[in-house]
Amino acid sequence: MSLGSSLGRSLRRCVAAAGIGAETLGSLDTNPVPADWRHVTKVDPETAKLLPVAYPLYLRHTDAVSVGGSSAVTAENTEETFRLLARAPVPAFHEPSEARHVTERTRELAAFLALPEVLNGETEALVGTLGEGLAYIRDEMVPALLREKLPGPLYRLVGDPLVDFATSWLLAEAVFEAYIVQNPASAAARRSGVDESDVLSPAVARERAMVADRHLDSEVVYVEYSGTYGGDEAADVLRAVADSVNGARVWYGGGIDDREKTVEMLAAGADTVVVGDCFHDVADEEVAVCARAVEALGVAPSADEIRSWFDAEVDPAETAAARYLRTTPGVDDPVAAAERALLAALALCFGALPAAVGEEGEPAAKRADRLLSAVDPGAVTRLAAALTDGDGDGSGNADAALGDYCGRVAAALSDTDPEPQRVRHLSLSKLSVSR
């Protein structure tokens, strides 16, 4: 070994030792995943999985959004989802199921890239998929980006070293999620080759978590029951895992659809619970509620008529909106919050509909603003605050943000959609109204 190699190796060891000492002996937290996240909402970019039109009002109660899915996901609908979530009041990060879903645009809009690795699946699920993704990034994605940015002669001169550097930098900046997949009937289990024999006991889960935390340097250990609630079994696994890790965050996902389940998993040792399907259920509910209201009231009712219809026809306590909001630890009154969000969706719908069906009169943004204020006095303030908190331009102009958003809602309801990538993923884009 040359002197230079020996010195380089020694330096790396010193840096690693300093980092380990800071994490284990001191109080330095070097994990880029925030320690205070308690609730993450998973959004599937699949076109059939919609976002509620009032999504800023819902997402202001979560800590972050994870964007990723396994079926019918493309680079295009992933970019579309991130563009829409640029209006969300919380950070959105990317958890791709395929490397080709990662684009220059998603990298710009995502808070970070989260790469999954399955601890109890086939070898393919741990290193094979990552290797395939790394090859795509190294051989295709990064060279294409550099060719676009650099003049031809300069790329030919420095392209290869820059490709290697950029690939390594991308991986160094990524967050790794070490999954323990515990529901063999789930799609996640099928993708990763997990069957009944691979379900881990608390003791074995603890061992795998220690490997992920101390050897693989995974920032997250994710106990995943995927679509079903793990209950006491999951609580035992979480206690064992939480007791074994030092720097990694412990996440739980699967079947969270009420406050009690959230509290139970957090109490068992999860730092964060992840909620998915029940958020998309809210979007489907919005379409159904707005369709019923339009059928009953026409396209241009007054605020009093909207409120009277809602009070007579909708029980907020029994809605998907309330179910989702019950999963969020920070909402004191989920039913009241659900009522406000559903009324906001109706106001946005009826504010935009006249313009969408070709009726002359008040501009859509102005009408929506007036209806929001009338059906719920605090609605404009809440929605504008949520929109500007998530606004990437830093302008802080609440009126402009709300007007712009109302315009996008009108576009979602209209046949003449100027920016489909920003609005077709909204629930009301699926509302069928006679033109």
Image (cartoon, rainbow, N blue to C red):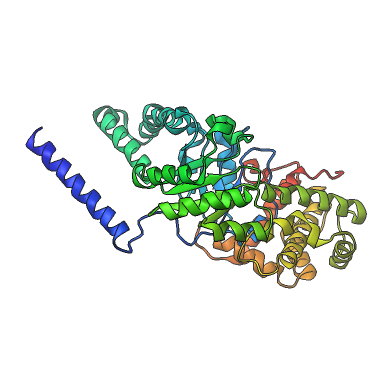
The residue at the far right in this view is: 296
Task: Residue at 55%, 32% (x, y): give it.
Answer: 197
382 vs 5, left or right, is right
What is the total number of numbered labels drawn onto the structure image?
0
Q: Position of residue 248 (x, y in %)?
A: 41, 52
In which image quadrant can residue 404 be found? bottom right
In which image quadrant can residue 366 be found? bottom right
In which image quadrant can residue 386 be found? bottom right
236 and 409: which one is in front? 236
Task: Residue at 38%, 54% (x, y): give it.
Answer: 246
Asked if residue 70 shows in the view, the reply is no
Asked if residue 43 shows in the view, the reply is yes
- Rendered-image quadrant of the C terminus: top right
Q: Position of residue 428 (x, y in %)?
A: 75, 48
Q: Position of residue 206 (x, y in %)?
A: 45, 47
- Look at the picture and state if 315 lies above or below 421: below
329 vs 145, left or right, is right
- Rendered-image quadrant of the N terminus: top left
